[in-house]
Every structure is written in C-alpha cells, then in structure tokens.
Image (spheres, grey):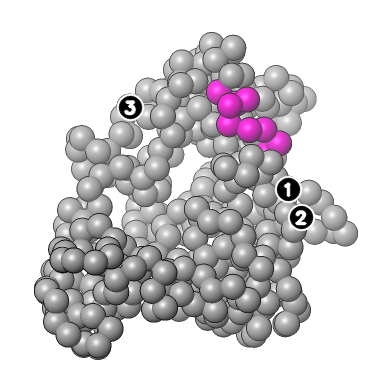
Amino acid sequence: MAEKVVVGMSGGVDSAAAALLLKRAGYDVVGLFMKNWEDDDDDEYCSTREDLIDAAAAADAIGIELEAVNFSAEYRDRVFADFLREYAAGRTPNPDVLCNAEIKFKAFLDHAMRLGAATIATGHYARTRKEKGKVLLLRGNDAAKDQSYFLHRLNQAQLARVMFPLGDLKKPQVRRMAEEAGLPNHAKKDSTGICFIGERPFREFLNRYLPKAPGAIVDENGTALGEHIGLAFYTIGQRKGIGIGGAGEAWYVAEKRIAANELVVVQGHDHRLLLRNSLKAGAPSWIAGEAPAERSSHTAKTRYRQAGAACTLALVRESEIAVDFPAPQWAVTPGQSVVLYDGEVCLGGGIIT
C-alpha cells in the first residue's frame, strides 16, 4: 500500500503544488485545510472562506480528498495569547514562528497521525536531510522564498515526520508547474499577512485587543516631540505612522522606554541608536536538540527579510544566548527571532530580549 501523507493545504499555490508533487510520486495524499481564526469570519480581511474554496478546487483538480479541521481554540491558547502578551510588554513578536511550532507542526501533526498518516507535508520552501542519526533543517533552494527562519523552533520528532516537496524548487517553477497541471490557484497572490489572521490594517486590529496608553515621543536627549498612542503600536525601525515631521532626515523608532512610557525616535536610517553589535535572546531552541559550541562562528538573521550576517555565539545557557556581530545590525527588535545558520543548515535560535 502507498504511504499516506497528509498535506496542509491553505488555498495557496505552494501547498497545492506540494500535494500535486506527492500525488505524482505515488503517495496516498490527503489534503487538510486548517481553520485557525474565528473572531471575524465575515470580515473583509478574513479570507478563510475564500481560501477553503480555493483549497477544495485545487484538491479536486489533483484528485485527492480534502478535510477541513478547526484549530481556532488551539491557535488562540497557544499562539494568539502569547502574541498579545508580547505586544502588551512592548515587544514585537513573530506569530508565524510560534504558529509553526504549536499549530502546523504540533496540532496538525497530531491530527494527521490520528488519520493514520506516516508523514505530513507543507508548501514551505525548506529542506531536510538525515545525517549521523539527526534530521537537519536546510534552507530552501530559492533564496528569495527560503522559510527556514520560520521553522527554526521545530524539533527532531517533528522534522522526522515532515516533508517539504518544494524545497528544491524556485517559485516561478512552482507556478509554472501548477498552471500546466490546471490548478485553479496557480496565479493566486502570495499571502503576506499575520499567520491565519490575514492582511488587515494592523494598528486597527491590535486596538481591538490592547488598550491605548498614550505617552511622550522624545528624541535621544529626552526632548518631547509629540505623543504616541501606546508603545505596543510601534516597532523598532518603524518610519511611517509615527506622527512627527519637520525638517531634516526621516524619523525612526529607536527605543521603547517601558518604565517611563516613552517612545524614543531618531533622525536618519543609520543613526547610532538603530545599530547594534550584539544581542541577547531567551527561550533558545535548537534543531539538533543541543546547542552549538560557545564562541563558535555562524551566520544569523535577526528578521526574515534579511541576508545572513556573520556572527559569534558569545554565550550559551539553557535559558539565554548572546550573539556578537562584527558588523552592526540595523533595528534589532525585542520579540523577533534571531536564527543561526551553519552554511545552509539552520541550527535554531531564540527570541531577542
């Protein structure tokens, strides 16, 4: 009998193409659509219904069954509650990282195993390789689409049961293959919104759940320049939407002074307060199950849309790591993830503090 694989199908072209490739490879493929958000299902920004229709149409074209499952309670408890706590504390979390670890590769994986699957698959642009009894997580071959950054908190048990069929492909190849196969979503625009919440005005969305707490906007010398609506609504490196103007270079958010409820802004993209040669990160997680050696040299990313930068793992503790960079990094943001690499191998990382 063919090995059963459950593919997470979001309605987008990537997950549909992953299912298509596995079907062609002879696997017994079942599609699974995850509904993970319920607060405003009829909202113009919530595309769950449209995405389910697209996933069903793609599954029909491929010739596989599609099941829909509701993980909204798990998402709210395991991801969204943490998301709100982090914002309330003045940090800028990355919910996609936690969503992968807690929903796509935990709740979804557990459900797939109950369906009798041997493996799950997703449309992520990443790869795995077995080596010396370990499963390595590797960058996807498409540098512009590589998603290993979002997968860095996965563990050996999770990676041993997952396939990434698109890892060796580039996005134009995927779209071309989907079009040639007659998949109705072959030209569907990529989603860039928050994991399962969609592409909506973010400040308006956050204001539903967090109260405004106005305070002073100040420059590096403490001179008042205006008023912010609440530190939770701003992020380090932000330029637009600050609400101050004037002569000279653009203003950027450089710091949040939580105790004083002050938002510190500076002029100029490369102002010294926006540059950091080191950082600390908590809750470290390592793909191999153990940390790399202290003082070892790697590359690291402090945000997804960023090239890897040379770094040294300066401190390794069970609850904290420190990373040094020979070249200063721009807008290092508490709450975001620092992810370390050894060449093409993703090692893991932590949450920037």
Q: Earlier in the sequence, mark 3 or mark 2?
A: 3
Q: Residue at x 59, y 73 (%)?
A: 327
Q: Is residue 89 visible?
A: no
Is residue 172 part of the magenta span, yes or no? Answer: yes
Please tell me which residue lies in front, 140 or 115: 140
Q: How many residues crowd around disc 3 within 10 Å: few (fewer than 14), some, or many (20 or more)? A: few
Q: Which residue is mark 2?
A: 135
Q: Is residue 37 above or below residue 210?
A: above
Q: Which residue is mark 3?
A: 50
Image spot of residue 200 (x, y percent): 25, 44
Q: Which residue is mark 1?
A: 128
Mark 2 touching mark 1, by CB under 8 A? Answer: yes
Image side of residue 174 versus residue 95, left or right:
right
- Magenta residues span 167-175
Q: Residue at x 32, y 77 (%)?
A: 255
Image spot of residue 110 (x, y percent): 56, 49
Mark 3 touching mark 2, by CB under 8 A? Answer: no
Q: Residue at x 73, y 54 (%)?
A: 344
Q: Residue furthest front?
A: 248
Identify the image quadrant of residue 150: bottom right
Label 1 amino acid? Answer: Thr
Please tell me which residue lies in front, 316 or 37: 316
